[in-house]
Amino acid sequence: MTQVPLKVAEDESQLFGHALLVFAQDLGSSKRLRLAITRKSADTPYLGDDGWQARPASVAAEVVNRTQGSTTLSIGPEVCDRIPVDLQVKVEVEGQNVWGNAFWPPVTPQPGGWSKELTPPPLPSPRLPERIIDLPEPPVSPPPIRVPEPVATEPRSRSRHLYVLIPLLLLLATAGTYAGYRLGWMDAWLTRPEPLAARFERLKQTDADGHELLALSGEAYRQGDAGIGMQAINLAMERGNKDAKLQIARNYDPNSFDPSKADRPDANKAARFYFELVVEGKSEAAGLLRSLCEKNASSPQDPAFNGFLTNTYCEGTLE
């Protein structure tokens, strides 16, 4: 049995409850395959057509794309609706001697549970015929009587005054600009800070490693702009910045939860990020993961740890 990289993501081209599984392996020419999906459980480790069960089972998957060295499969809500977010699963392709494991991503569930069919959209209401109402024509007003305007005569001496006034105004404007430079206000105006939104748009195009985006996120949070702060730090994490990923994990960690930067404490999300950072060589994450597991063990009634995957993140050793 050969382990290969496996990537799982929500299939946004489908309506609700569909996911794409991308195996880094050529899986033959069949259009449909069977997958054995298992989890860590002493009672019901296998996922079948009727849900999690004790006996070995498999589910159907459709091959939707093939490239050199890669095969993409699609599964529907009959599978996705039964797998919770962040659960670590092992996926084996029957008859191919290939398997991979992954943490299950967020997949929008089927509204009201999986019904094997989609509810057709409501038909549009028929348009009512337009009513034409005959209105009487408005009376025609007589044209206004135009009174000739008196022609203003300006004294000829005013034009002579303009020749003196214009150079004087130009001289005053030049003196004011020079005084502004001397006083420093012009320099301050020219060096005013770049707005957060403009800076974020610029860094989206130029900051490849996410370091400047992470700094922008901290500045945005300090100024009370949580929208740009969250977008900037998530984009920095997507670009491989481990410090950004560690900070997001701390924001969701019940030990260091920050309500201004996360909607709620999420022990599973924090533990998942810590676990991945340890694998990526971020040594600081190991201690934070141990602290999170100790908090879970000492506070079993804490609602922040409801549904926490202790078997996945807190058993065994990270060394």
Image: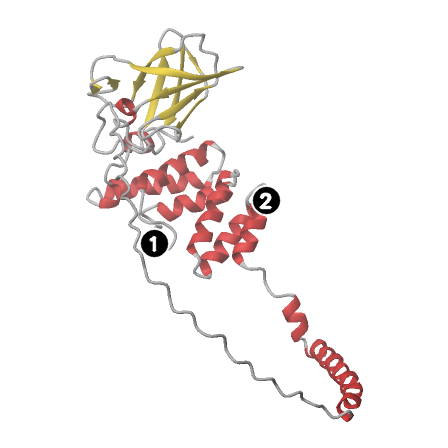
Q: Amino acid at mark 1?
A: Pro
* Residue in the image at 36% along x and 26% along y: 19
Instruction: Look at the picture and state if 65 lies above or below 290.
Output: above
Instruction: Look at the picture and state if 231 lies above or below 104.
Output: below
Q: Secondary structure at mark 1?
A: loop
Screen quadrant of the C terminus = top left
Label 2, residues with CA under 10 Å away: few <14, some 14-19, many ≥20: few
* Residue in the image at 38% along x and 48% along y: 251
Residue 267 in percent (x, y) is at 31, 41
122, 260: nearer the viewer: 122
Q: Which of the marked residues, 1 or 2, is nearer the chain's N terminus? A: 2
Screen quadrant of the N terminus = top left
Residue 265 in percent (x, y) is at 31, 47
Contact? badges 1 and 2 (CB < 8 Å): no
| Picture quadrant where residue 246 is located | top left
Residue 217 in percent (x, y) is at 49, 52
Point out which mark residue 96 bears.
none
Q: Is residue 50 left or right of residue 207?
A: left
Image color mode: secondary structure
Point out which mark residue 205 bears.
2
| Picture quadrant where residue 116 is located | top left
Q: Secondary structure at mark 2?
A: helix
Label 1, residues with CA under 10 Å away: few <14, some 14-19, many ≥20: few
218, 22: nearer the viewer: 22
Q: Amino acid at mark 2?
A: Gln
Q: Is residue 268 left or right of residue 232?
A: left
| Picture quadrant where residue 117 is located | top left
Residue 41 in percent (x, y) is at 24, 23
Residue position marked by numbered label 1 in the rendering: 259
